Amino acid sequence: MRIFDPHIHMTSRTTDDYEAMYAAGVRAVVEPAFWLGQPRTSPASFLDYFDALLGWEPFRAAQYGIAHHCALALNPKEANDPRCTPVLDELPRYLVKDSVVAVGEIGYDAMTPAEDTALAAQLQLAAEHGLPALVHTPHRDKLAGLHRTLDVVRESALPVERTLLDHLNETTVAAAVDSGCWLGFSVYPDTKMDTDRMVAVLRTFGTERILVNSAADWGRSDPLKTREVAGAMLAAGFTDDDVDRVLWRNPVAFYGLGGRLQLDVPVPDALHEGNSVLRGGE
Ligand SMILES: [Zn+2]
């Protein structure tokens, strides 16, 4: 089984997590830029973080046989902080880097006017750079948040088929399916979607354009939730091909839209099992 976690914050995770993820079949991840918990006080703080997502974290992931790409953005929460918003002027020179496969995560947190501005500006940046966008939907007031998000996406220059709506659940999935966007579901240990609810959504809505992620970060979360969903899908009667579509081919197709995805990571000696290069994690 090969797994691509399309939304995980490895900066907040340990090397034990990388080892366990590799053992579970995870061969690729996308790490979107996010809020670190401690507020940033200047754009320079973002730039060091972006550099870590472009340099250090892919290096660390490669030690464990995992291909690491990132999505860069000003996150929804810090879009409200005038000390942070000048980073929007720095983003263009980062969005041209090879391992940046999307703009994200962007979207709404508290649905403020400042968030409107940052979301629209960054959808425009995605369109200008030929990149797709990872758009987080708010955790509170979810359906209203989804509709407001879709209004901004539809007004933007970025086509819906280059937009991934993330953190969906049963209240937002139908509207998201109708929008033509890609659909992301974050499976957590005890809030939001869980494994059984995820399988039920897949039963109802099928496997097309659906991505499942762990969104693991510094909060209570589990980087192996993708593997757990794969197991639950098989137990529920989905085929190996269905699992491969949701947990590998769909994220490859979405993040491949920018033409920069590079999935060949040499297998480190410690993980060697006879083949010198992992090609998509067979
Ligand atoms: Zn996230």
Image (spheres, rainbow, N blue to C red):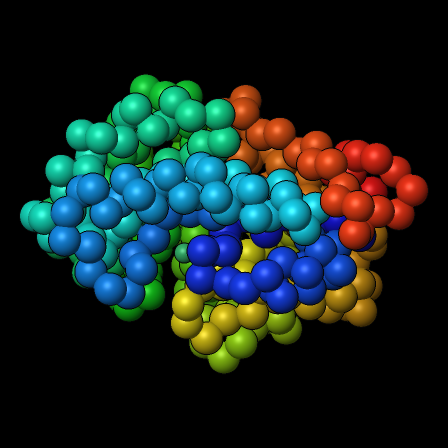
Ligand 1 sits in which quadrant?
bottom left
Q: How many labels does the image show?
A: 0
Q: Examine the image and state in which quarter residue 117 appears.
A: top left
Task: Judge by depth and name the residue closer to the eye, 259 or 273.
Answer: 273
- In the visual, does 64 lie left or right of 68? right
- Image quarter where the C terminus lies is top right
What percent of the width, then of the height, locates residue 123? 29, 33
What percent of the width, then of the height, locates residue 257? 53, 27
- In the visual, does 57 lie left or right of 229? left
Look at the picture and state if 64 lies above or below 164.
below
Residue extending farthest front: 269
- In the visual, does 10 lie left or right of 4? left
Q: Examine the image and state in which quarter residue 265 appears.
A: top right
- In the visual, does 146 lie left or right of 278? left
What percent of the width, then of the height, locates residue 266? 73, 36
Q: Can residue 77 be seen in this view?
A: yes
What percent of the width, then of the height, locates residue 140? 28, 68
Q: Which residue is drawn at 70% across and 46% down?
A: 65
Q: Is residue 116 visible?
A: no
Residue extending farthest bottom: 190
Task: Judge by depth and name the residue closer to the eye, 167 or 173.
Answer: 167
Q: Which residue is drawn at 42% across and 25% down?
A: 97
Look at the picture and state if 214 lies above or below 2.
below
Look at the picture and state if 282 lies above or below 226.
above
Q: Which residue is drawn at 39% across and 22% down?
A: 96
Q: Residue at x 78, y 38 (%)?
A: 278
